[in-house]
Amino acid sequence: MMRLPDESPIAAIATPPGRGGIGVVRVSGSGLDCVIRGLLGEVRAAALAPRHAGYGPFLAADGSEIDRGLALHFPAPHSYTGEDVFELQGHGGPVVMQLLLRRVLEAGAPIGLRLAMPGEFTQRAYLNDKLDLAQAEAVADLIDATTEQAARSATRSLAGEFSQAIHALVEQVIQLRMLVEATLDFPEEEIDFLERADAFGQLARIRATLAEVLARARQGALLREGLNVVLIGRPNVGKSSLLNALAGAEVAIVTPIAGTTRDRVAQAIQVEGVPLNVIDTAGLRETADEVERIGIARTWEEVGRADVILHLQEAGQESGALDADIAARLPAGVPIVRVLNKIDLAGEGARLEREDGRPSAIWLSARGGEGVELLRAALLELAGWQGAGESQFIARERHLQALRAASDHLDAAEENARRRAEQLELFAEELRLAQERLNEITGEFTPDDLLGVIFSRFCIGK
């Protein structure tokens, strides 16, 4: 079990900055009696029952009243962090909160009470076995969720669904490792122990389960990260109109004047609960206008960060040299969809065209709305979205990397296993490596520097 690098008690404001009806100051650590007595007074401190709210004044050092509200005490280990936790729930004005925090730190000076670092409360919960690492990350993901589906998936991860799936996989790998290593310990056995124990069948089932978990994790990662969709094209093809149509609001200025959009305009939208970051960019053309040239340079920067590129052109018009030049500069490996806009002017109907089974071109009218739903559906398809359900759990890129690496090790294990005895040591080693990569997800095997990166991205009061 890892220990905290600094076991001093910590305190922080646990509610967002700014005005609010309620504000919370949280304290965690051992020896909090001096803080409780200092803020509540001797009589109220003695009467405060564990896990029961007590209402009354919060006191300054001279006994005057700073604020009035609820006090709660959660003795260890029955608290969020697994340590003694003391909370003051008062009025949410920023000045009041700062006064309370200052008073708490003052009262806790004899025990070395200090201001918490970002994410330190949740880090302590993890190190005290109240949460595993995947659950701890789900706390931040629930706070940062931008869609209902993302929030629901983060809640499932926080409740332990993702961790349970990983633990089940690890247990299966351990069972198989035991069989393989037993065979290595008794090579003189004439019976093919691995075949009798269905070791290869077990490996196949583990690989199938891992593939299912990886698919669910990809969906969760999509809900967390969203999809960066970049609109490009020459001036006046309707990029800003399409952004407005997708957003359902007038978020970008639309005029018939070429070069109206000089800089990126980003709008976060959601389609079936999946967050899409749609980015309108400056029209691409040769120009002497210095401001417009800067906007065009930024357009190509956004193209380099895109998950999907929508190349807008006008329906009913032949692709010119400028459109060909734009298409030639687009990066390989990123899904590109031609959007033929203004079908209402060209007398065309809304439709979707495919190439190699994937959406390749969509005919629509951004102004009239015809075909916009086809575009929304195509974006979800390109993202790999399989529909909302109760099976997704939130996931991060590091989780996906660990799952893919574990899958690679299991593939290598099968290859070595089929070579029988001379490769059994390698079979066992690949199983061990797969187990380590899976354990990284929940934190059973995690370098300290990775923990620092993860928890530093939390807010102060968590």
Image (cartoon, rainbow, N blue to C red):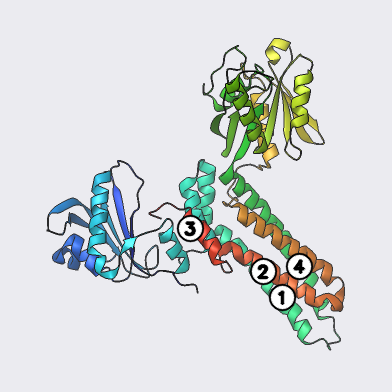
The residue wearing badge 4 is: 203
Q: Position of residue 105 (x, y in %)?
A: 26, 60
The residue wearing badge 3 is: 455
Q: Identify the secondary structure beneath mark 4.
A: helix
Q: Nearer the viewer, mark 1 or mark 3?
A: 3
Q: Nearer the viewer, mark 1 or mark 2?
A: 2
What residue sits 69% from the left and 37% below the top?
381
The residue wearing badge 1 is: 177
Spatial separation of the CA atoms under disc 1 and disc 2: 9 Å
Mark 1: which amino acid?
Answer: Arg
Q: Nearer the viewer, mark 3 or mark 2?
A: 3
Spatial separation of the CA atoms under disc 4 and disc 2: 13 Å
The residue wearing badge 2 is: 435
Label 4 or label 1, whichever comes before in sequence order? 1
* Quarter holding residue 345: top right
Label 3 or label 2, whichever comes before in sequence order? 2
